[in-house]
Image (cartoon, rainbow, N blue to C red):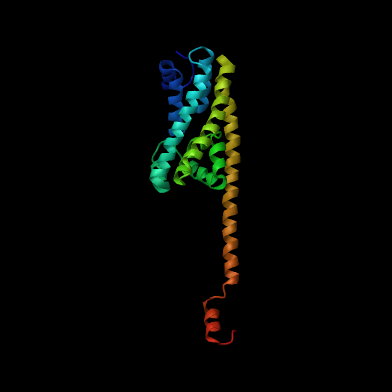
Amino acid sequence: MIESSAPQWINTLMDTMGAPGAGLAIALENLFPPLPSEVILPLAGFAAGTGRMDLWAALLWTTAGSVIGALALYGVGALLGRERTVAIAAKLPLVKVSDIERTEAWFAKHGTKAVLFGRMIPIFRSLISVPAGIERMSIPVFLGLTTLGSAVWNTLFVLAGYLLGDNWEEVTGYVSVYSKVVLGVAGLAVVAFVVARVARKGKGRRRLERTDPGPAVTERAGSGLPRE
């Protein structure tokens, strides 16, 4: 059995199923974002380093698990739509509606790039599939971007665990710092996006008010009476 501080069910999956177990754990991590990919992936790399599974198999299965989990969330967004998806998410433990809203804003701003790079950002990496489904992004495009982004993220963490060996759990400390920095930057970007959108709408309303002569003036102009 793999000795670690990871949740016992993750250890059990990898001990009993090997690389497919790691893939299943990652698929579940996509469906339930609070589950720790930064623990699952390095642990899979460590297991590969000790001979419990093949390294290439670990990379392939974890990437397949990421894509399957992402496709499931895409389907949820496509089938339920935004309102019902958010309503269900609000009832789930450890899932924040604010995280979904931030992800939606980021998707609205960056589109396809959000799906690719979102796979490398904590929290966003799972939730980015939801607005992609709601907006019915082309499935081949979605799968291509998700596979590429997931492969990069998974490879980095699996190799980190493989190379660190018994010290694989050190990865979580680095990920914690990375998560705080990236989420902070993403949060600021979303705020800037919202502020810019509100400002544009305000300018549009003021421009319309300046060009609209108003009902009274329009009526006088149509009747031939002199304007005041």
Q: Tell me: 186 left or right of 60.
A: right
Q: Taking 198 as reference, is 208 above or below it?
A: below
In the displayed image of the protein, which residue is found farthest to the bottom? 225
Q: Residue 119: where, in percent of width, then height? A: 53, 34
Q: Residue at x 40, y 16 (%)?
A: 16
The spot of residue 225 in percent (x, y) is: 56, 87
Would you identify the image quadrant in which residue 86 lies?
top left
Q: Is residue 89 visible?
A: no
The number of callouts visible is: 0
Image point (56%, 17%), residue name: 162
The single residue placed furthest to the front in the displayed view is: 140
61 sits left or right of 183 in the view: left
- Which quadrant of the view contains residue 121? top right
Picture coordinates of residue 140, whole percent (x, y) = 48, 38
x, y percent for residue 7: 44, 22
- The reply to whether residue 151 is in sight is yes
